[in-house]
Image: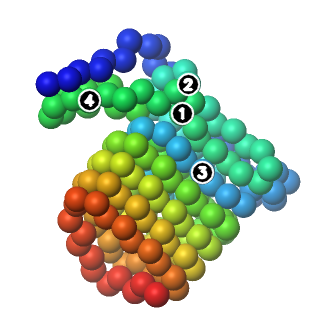
Amino acid sequence: GVHYITEERERINLSEKYTEAEIAELGIQDILIDCNAYITVQRGDELSVVATNVTEDYKIRCSNGKLSVLQEKKNIVIGFGDWNIREKEEVLVTIPESFVPEQVVIRSGSGKVSVSEVTSDRMELDSGSGAVDMTDVKTETLRVDSGSGKMYLNRITATESDLDTGSGSVKGDNVSLG
């Protein structure tokens, strides 16, 4: 088999929090998460981003109304089984109930994506490989593009939706898609 193993780089933790006043002041409307981490987006007391065990090419940025978590140099890691699980980067984004983003966009090359108790006007999820778990999501427009990996949708409401799965299973409960 082929192994491309990334050179060991220093691991760091990043964290940012935004109060309701700061959300308004910064005009945050969109959330973009674009990285090869285990990504969790869930309801919390405040808008926050916590990135754990990440490499220094991860950045949290806030500009032009967009809060972004970006991995600037994505490395392709081809492995077998869970040999690299210990090294996995994790990104946790919490969104308070009082804040409904216009857009939540998640781009994950590989890694589990979990979204729960999130309301937004538009939700877009692009996952290369890795399990996707969405629970209690309300959105006008839902677009999911998943290459391979199990997808589990539970209590999802979307007026307009486009689900595209390559080679993975989709299970759903209480899903209302337009």
The span from disc 2 to disc 1 (Cα, nearest Å) is: 6 Å
Residue under the image location 41 percent in, 39 percent down: 37
Secondary structure, mark 2, is loop
Upstream in sequence: badge 2 or badge 4: 2
Q: Mark 1 is on which residue type?
A: Gln
Q: Which residue position is annotated with label 3?
A: 32
Upstream in sequence: badge 3 or badge 2: 3
Secondary structure, mark 1, is strand
Upstream in sequence: badge 4 or badge 1: 1
Image-based side of 143 in relation to 30, left or right: left
Dividing the picture into quadrants, the one containing residue 2 is top left
In front here: 85 or 42?
A: 85
Q: Pointer 2: residues within 10 angstroms few (<14), some, or many (20+)?
A: few
The span from disc 2 to disc 4 (Cα, nearest Å) is: 19 Å
Task: Residue 43: give x, y in percent of width and height.
Answer: 51, 61
The quadrant of the picture occupied by the N terminus is top left
| Residue 44 marker | none
Q: Which residue position is annotated with label 4?
A: 78
In front here: 156 or 166?
A: 166
Whether residue 150 is visible, yes or no, is no
Image-based side of 22 in relation to 35, left or right: right
| Residue 154 versus residue 167 in the image, above or below | below
